[in-house]
Amino acid sequence: MPRLLLELAPLHSELILVIGAMALLMWGAFSKETENRADLINWAAIAVLIVAGGVLASQTAVAETMFERSFRFDAFARFVKMIVLISSAGALLLASNDMRACKYLKFEYPVLVLLATAGMLMMISANDLIALYLALELQSLALYVLAAFRRDDVRSSEAGLKYFVLGALSSGMLLYGASLIYGFTGATNFYDIAAVARSDGAGQNVGLIFGLVFLLVGLAFKISAVPFHMWTPDVYQGAPTPVTALFAAAPKAAAFALLTRVMIIAFGNIKPQWQQIIVFLSIASMVLGAVAAIGQTNIKRLMAYSSIANMGFVLVGLAAGSVDGVQGVLIYLATYLVMTLGVFAVILAMRRESGAVEDIDDLAGLATTNPGMAATMAIMMFSLAGIPPLAGFWGKYYVFLAAVKANLWPLAIIGVVASVVGAFYYIRIVLIMYVNEAKAGAANRFLRVPMREGAVMALACLITLLAFLPFPLRNGSLGDWIINTASAAARSLFG
């Protein structure tokens, strides 16, 4: 048994999540239903995620493969898996208060989150088309249910149905692309596909290129890149807010890691063919995300278009197709995680006696009625806008720098312009909070910020403000550690 556990070392985090999910499912199904049962299981799920993260952090980053090279664990996988685990734990921490207030606090929620997270971790390490699809579906099936988790809410049911239908369509396209790739290469493993792509004339193989395009369509849907973004605003608005907080961070990071691994390892030898597709997706996402968000009045829909624009910025780093580009991708994903959790902590705290509110205009005068909450939102908005020296600025800096080094000057310039346009709606929220007057009457005041949301806000603010300043670590700032770790992770993908 110890020998088997040693052989399965690269899979320990996934096993902990799956076993933990099954144990919590049995606990919830066979225990007596009490008021605090779901909350206890939620805390237990957070503990499972922390244990999985601790095990992951203790593992060496030496590249290892399993199951006939279909599963690969390396420094790149470890970096993104840690982002996913932190995102899922943060989303679970933010969930309970809203679910209790809206009377849909169920023990199945943390179980589904653990199963979805296990699928995400498997996606990050997938090194084979079959492993890719299995991991993708394990994640997706759990997320479909989570989107429709609030069964008595028509908007939530609609969001789940839209996500399921469009997700099934994208999975079909992805499978068709995978079958074409297999048909023209005779392989499903990324290394074997790379060997075929290295041969003369591979870049002119129409069947292989068509397969790659369909595969990219399926993966672009998962990261909500334009023009495969149509599900994002409706699902973000309709799904329960804690579910939206999960959608905004963890699945995007996992899908982007998978996309990066496919492009760099399997198709790195035909970069000119896929680079132009990635450039198109990046430009379209940045531009539409920046422009379409301007007229939004619902904060969750605005964050949906913000996420589309941010995925466009991350695609800038992937388009470079270099070590610097992948490093920029990882730094951006890490900073985006912090900003997303901070923003959704504020959104979940936007609650009055009459219930939760989502309209941006309801933030009017927040600086007067709740200065701490307003300050948190302002810091997150400035960071998302890319204002230095906040963490969001450095994420954009490294992806744009990688694009410039790869001679993708036009892409970097368009990215900067889109970032300036996007800054309008971020700064508009700040102006509403600090300039507009609050509506009179006690009924229009937000309730006191709950402890869990307040803790996430405080931590997000500290990291966003201080991460890239030259303290307090002995060997530099937290930002220096993130940059160096991301650099090592990026090199492991090219090794």
Image: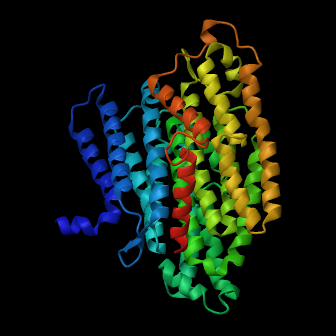
Q: Which one is nearer the viewer's eye here, 187 or 471?
A: 471
Residue at x-position 38% and y-position 41%? 110
Number of marks present in the image shown: 0
Q: Residue furthest bottom?
A: 200
What colouring style does the render use? rainbow
Q: Position of residue 159 (x, y in %)?
A: 56, 44
Left or right: residue 297 versus residue 27 is right
The residue at the point 49 percent across, 50 percent down is 83
Position of 291 relative to 128 (above/below): above
x and y percent of residue 53 in the render? 38, 50
- On the question of residue 172 being in view, the answer is no
The one nearer the camera, 25 or 118, is 118
Residue 315 shows in the view: yes
Q: Position of residue 417 (x, y in %)?
A: 82, 50
Residue 10 sits in quarter: bottom left
x 59%, y 72%: residue: 264
Q: Residue pushed farthest front? A: 474
In this image, 186 relative to 287: left or right? left
252 or 466, which lies in front?
466
Q: Tell me the residue at 65%/73% (across/down).
A: 213
The N terminus sits in image quarter: bottom left
Residue at the limit of the structure toward the top, as seen here: 441
Residue 217's place in the image compared with 142, above or below, is below
Left or right of 396 in this view: 346: left
Q: Quadrant of residue 339?
A: top right
